[in-house]
Image (cartoon, grey):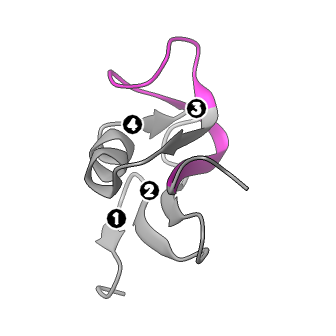
Amino acid sequence: MPTYKYQIESLYPMVGPLLPEGGVSTLGLHDHALAIVIAAKSVTVPYGKEIRVVHVTSGEVIFRKTAATVTTAGEE
């Protein structure tokens, strides 16, 4: 069982000021607000692909963004 509650994920490498250098495609965190902030400040390589924050236990996507859109749970 994972030791974190939220996962930032993308099918493409993510880069940003709050991510480790070199880019990552997944990152596990305990705090949902921190996970959303990091995801919101990040972009993918190539630019514009989807980044999601997922609640690991339920599998619910609580935040999703692409270059053109940003949504949180309940706004879709």
Q: Which residue is mark 4?
A: 42
Q: Which residue is mark 1?
A: 69
Q: Quadrant of residue 34?
A: top left
Verify whether residue 10 appears in magenta: yes
Q: Residue at x 32, y 52 (%)?
A: 36
First-in-chain label (1 vs 3): 3
Numbered badge on residue 66: 2
Q: Position of residue 4 (x, y in %)?
A: 54, 49
Q: Quadrant of the C terminus?
A: bottom left
Front residue of 60 and 63: 60
Q: Mark 2 is on which residue type? A: Thr
Nearest-to-viewer mark from 4 and 1: 4
Q: How many marks?
A: 4
Q: Secondary structure at mark 2?
A: loop
Instruction: Report which residue position mark 3 lands on.
Output: 45
Amino acid type at image mark 4 = Ser
Q: Residue at x 50, y 57 (%)?
A: 5
Magenta segment boundaries in residue numbering: 6-24
